[in-house]
Amino acid sequence: GAVVSQHPSRVICKSGTSVKIECRSLDFQATTMFWYRQFPKQSLMLMATSNEGSKATYEQGVEKDKFLINHASLTLSTLTVTSAHPEDSSFYICRAASSYEQYFGPGTRLTVT
Amino acid sequence: AQKITQTQPGMFVQEKEAVTLDCTYDTSDPSYGLFWYKQPSSGEMIFLIYQGSYDQQNATEGRYSLNFQKARKSANLVISASQLGDSAMYFCAMREDQNFNKFYFGSGTKLNVKP
């Protein structure tokens, strides 16, 4: 079965609204969560890294006030896209990691209309 | 410099034939790991194979093998007996032990298997 889940798998929202994406590690404790976005036919671009109980570290060029990341427990991290715009439409994928293992979530396809 | 380079944006292969997807890497860390992932149109990242920098033998997993040439810093993926279901994007990735959880991804290769 899946080791890391993401919810929702697909979401369509209107411009200006906020969307929350959940990433859950099901069978292990994820001390670190990574959030990526991927545009069509491109590679994964790391947005931010979060350690459980700490503030996320954002990559250069990623707006931390727009992409809010919370990693409150060893099994759950959330990415909230605030005031979404059409250019935020993308595939968002998390990766959960411990000292010994790491797994990708199945991804969330966000469409902002 | 790019940490991971995949020079083939797209590849075609005939069903049942073997295909090699190229990957070169750049690191000064003596201890690192190399990964290959398959990403079908659904978007999920499917782990295929892993090679550690100190592994003496090339990694193999079923129809997948990794041609690891350390001196050349290359880690090519070989898929034998291609199947139609192998059509997907393939990403090479590297992890350096000095920053254990951070991955560097290549730009990917789109593989199309022809019937």
Image (cartoon, coloured by chain):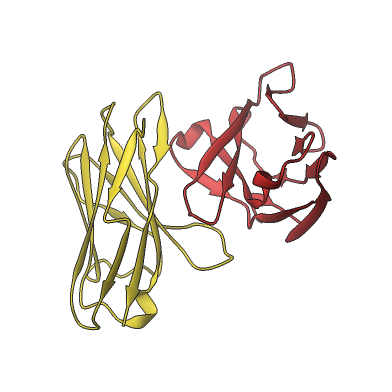
Chain colours: A yellow, B red
Q: In which quarter of the image is residue B24?
A: top right
In the displayed structure, would residue A71 be above or below residue A11? above
Q: Quadrant of residue A80?
A: bottom left
Q: Residue at left 25%, top 28%?
A: A29
Give the total number of marks visible in the rendering. Answer: 0
Q: Quadrant of residue B59?
A: top right
Left or right side of B31 for A88: left
Q: Residue at left 30%, top 42%?
A: A5
Q: Is residue A111 visible?
A: yes
Quadrant where the image shows the N terminus of chain B:
bottom right
Residue in front for this viewpoint, B13 or B68:
B13
Residue in front for this viewpoint, B46 or B108:
B46
Residue in front for this viewpoint, A108 or B58:
A108
Q: Residue at left 30%, top 81%?
A: A85
- Measured as percent of width and height from the top left, residue B86 is found at 67, 45
Q: Farthest residue in the front direction?
A: B115
Q: Residue at left 28%, top 26%?
A: A27
- Measured as percent of width and height from the top left, residue A104 is found at 41, 42
- Measured as percent of width and height from the top left, residue A98 is found at 34, 29
Q: Can residue B8 be seen in this view?
A: no
